[in-house]
Amino acid sequence: MNAQAATPISRNPFAEGNLSPEGWIATETVNGIRLYRHEIDGSAIPALRAETLFQATPQQIYEIISDYDHFTAFVPQVEKSRILKQAGNTLWVYQRLSFPPPFAARQYVLQSSDQLSRPEKLYFRVNWTLDQEQSRELLGTKDSIPTAFAGFWELRPGQKDHTTAATYAVYLDPGGKLPAWLVNRGTRRLLPALITAIRKKLQRF
């Protein structure tokens, strides 16, 4: 089945009530990163989740994962990333995501919000979802826009001082002619690669 044949229950499966907690299935642990998957009704592409512990405070991790203007310096496969506008706790972010040849890159606008964060309690929650309307308005075509792209970061203090218990979840249906098995393999590799990249960035602080 091609990725374009997927019919997700929602463009944002992480919206309240869409995914059951018991639906998450542990798949493997890689370098201290626990990976999970959650099947999506009507889609060949599952939602993925990673849990890990960072040797840094939640505030430090939040500053990294919300620094969209500098994603190209450390986030795998992100060729372009810039904040377009901000309204309160919501950001609109343009990004270009590369894929190995011969597959075309995807461009899009994400709507990102941290309104659920509680910095005074060292708790941070960043949610994002694809803004189809803004993406088409900016790019002028839907051919390179993903069918669905959503996810979240959740950051809490770890059991030890100066540590962060982090959860990262993502659902990506790039659309087009990419086969679902290739999308699943690529996204599965992206999660530990992203967390490893953040760990390396922390070492330079």
Image (cartoon, rainbow, N blue to C red):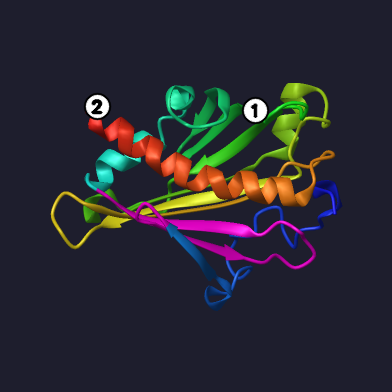
Q: How many neighbours does mark 1 have within 10 angstroms: few (below 14), some (14-19), or many (20 or more)?
A: some
Closest to the observer, 69 or 23:
23
Q: Residue at x 58, y 74 (%)?
A: 23
Label 1 element class: loop
- What label sits on residue 98 in the rendered view? 1
Q: Main secondary structure of the magenta part?
A: strand
Residue 40 to residue 179: above or below: below
Q: Amino acid at mark 1?
A: Ser
Q: Residue at x 15, y 58 (%)?
A: 160
Answer whether residue 118 is magenta in the image: no
Q: Residue at x 68, y 29 (%)?
A: 100
Closest to the observer, 121 or 199:
199
Residue 131 to residue 188: above or below: above
State whether residue 89 appears in this view. Answer: no
Q: Quadrant of the N terminus?
A: bottom right
Q: Residue furthest left?
A: 161
Label 2 element class: loop
Answer whether residue 53 is magenta in the image: yes
* Region of the chain picked out in magenta, as a range: 30-54
Residue 87 pos. (x, y %): 50, 34
